[in-house]
Amino acid sequence: MKILILCTGNSCRSQMAQGFLQTFDRDLTVYSAGTNASGEVNPLAIKVMQELDIDISKHTSDPVEQYLNEEWDYVITVCDDAKELCPVFSGNVKHRLHLGFEDPFLLNGSDEYVISEFRRIRDEIKAAFWQFYMNNIK
């Protein structure tokens, strides 16, 4: 099963979702990309995933254009902007799905507040992708 997860910057939400799916099932082929890729994974996303013993520090932030000609079982958008800007894939996409989450990168406040929100959004992503996995893949 081959899955592509899309968001705008490909630095937080899509990276966390990719990390979760890869740990749920090592046989899945999971990539993530951005409609406007930032070029790096957000350090706080790496940190909150490490708290769950999931290492996304070696992930890369990739532009969606490099995946447009491939075949996918699922293309999943995790933000409204990516859903609206999702390009047309010339490869075969069996299923498109949207699971939207707030962008933790845009949050302001104290360090404690921001990290707590990263954790909250991480946990929402984990729950939603576990449900997706159990209902569609397992």
Image: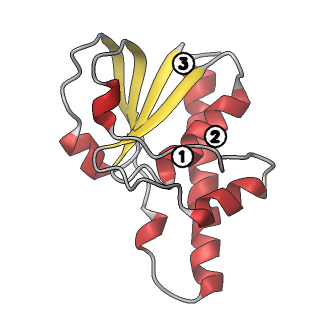
Q: Nearer the viewer, mark 1 or mark 3?
A: 1
Residue 69 drawn at (x, y percent): 28, 17
- Secondary structure at badge 3 equals helix
Q: CA distance from mark 1 to mark 2?
A: 6 Å
Q: Viewed as shown, does residue 41 lie left or right of 81?
A: right
Q: Is residue 134 above or below residue 35?
A: above
Q: Circle 1: is it few (<14), some (14-19), or many (20+) Cα within 10 Å?
A: many
- The quadrant of the rendering that contains the C terminus is top right
**Closer-to-camera residue (95/88):** 88
Q: Secondary structure at mark 1?
A: helix
Q: Residue at x 45, y 76 (%)?
A: 107
The residue type indicated by label 2 comes to Gly
Q: Quarter-wise, where is residue 98 in the image?
A: top left
Kind of residue at disc 1: Gln
Is residue 1 shown above or below 44?
above
Quarter holding the N terminus?
A: top right
Q: Are marks 1 and 2 in contact (CB under 8 Å)?
A: yes
Could you say where residue 66 lies in the image, as x and y percent from the top left?
33, 29
Find disc 2 in the rendering and name its residue: 19
Q: Position of residue 20 (x, y in %)?
A: 65, 39
**11 displayed left or right of 137:** left
Q: Which residue is mark 3?
A: 136
Earlier in the chain: of badge 2 and badge 3, it is 2
Classify 10 Å Cα crowding around label 2: few (below 14), some (14-19), many (20 and above).
Answer: many
**What residue is at 40 percent from the left and 48 percent from the top?**
100
Residue positioned 23% across, 36% down in the render: 86
State the image quarter where residue 25 is shown: top right
Question: Viewed as shown, does residue 14 lie left or right of 59?
Answer: left
Disc ID at residue 15: 1
Three-letter code, disc 3: Asn
- Residue placed furthest toward the bottom: 110
Label 2 – label 3 distance at C-alpha: 18 Å
